[in-house]
Amino acid sequence: MSLTRRDTFGLALGAAALTVLPFRANASAEDLIAEFTGGAATGDSGVELTAPEIAENGNTVPISVDAPGASAIFVLAAGNPTPAVATFAFGPLAGSRMASTRIRLAGTQEVIAVAKLEDGTFARTAKTVKVTIGGCGG
């Protein structure tokens, strides 16, 4: 098999594209928040995030988010390879606007919760969790 100059150039372009594509696939936490809010400003009150200050194991970190009057809550782990953790949606007949789950954290990082309130505004809070043993390959 003989490679022509055109074949070599095509392979080089393909290799360059494959190295650049994964970086754009992992959007940053701020980009994801802007996408969720539609670029709207976020307030500091209206959502409460409960997470441990220190987590001994990053594989199962318990968190809970409470946002009275929220129609949706978006949770992110800013330091994870894929920051988006979960989106919780609440209907008009929901008894409480609260969710709890366990998440995986790659290391010490900030956990962010953004709530879309029923009046169309957004509220944001964050809490730093110190992880002693990483859960996402750390």
Image (spheres, helix red, strand yellow):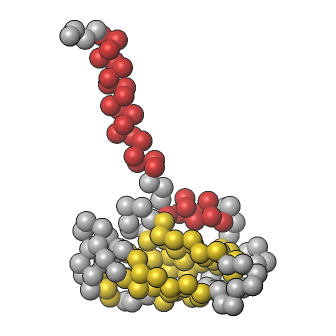
Q: Where, by quadrant of the figure, is residue 132 drawn? A: bottom left
Q: Residue furthest left?
A: 1
Is residue 92 toward the left or the right of residue 135 in the image? right
- Quarter of the image that includes the C terminus: bottom left
Position of 123 relative to 50 (above/below): above
Q: Quadrant of residue 97?
A: bottom right
- Name the residue located 36 percent from the left edge and 37 percent from the top edge: 18
Name the residue: 31% across, 77% down.
Answer: 59
Which x, y percent locates residue 87? 57, 71
Task: Specify whether 75 is left or right of 91.
Answer: left
Task: Note whether 92 is above or below 136 in the view shown.
Answer: below
Residue occupying image coordinates x 39% and y 34%: 17
**Residue at the far front in the pictured view:** 93
Q: Quadrant of residue 69?
A: bottom right
Spot occupied by residue 20 in the image (x, y as percentages of width and height)? 39, 40
Picture coordinates of residue 80, whole percent (x, y): 38, 66
Quadrant where the N terminus sits is top left
Q: Horizontal placement of 126 versus 79: left or right?
A: right
**Residue 86: where, in percent of width, then height?**
51, 71
Q: Nearer the viewer, residue 89 or 43?
A: 89
* Placement of 53 over or under 117, stated as above or below: below
Q: Is residue 122 visible?
A: no
Q: In this orientation, does residue 85 appear? A: yes
Tag count in the figure? 0
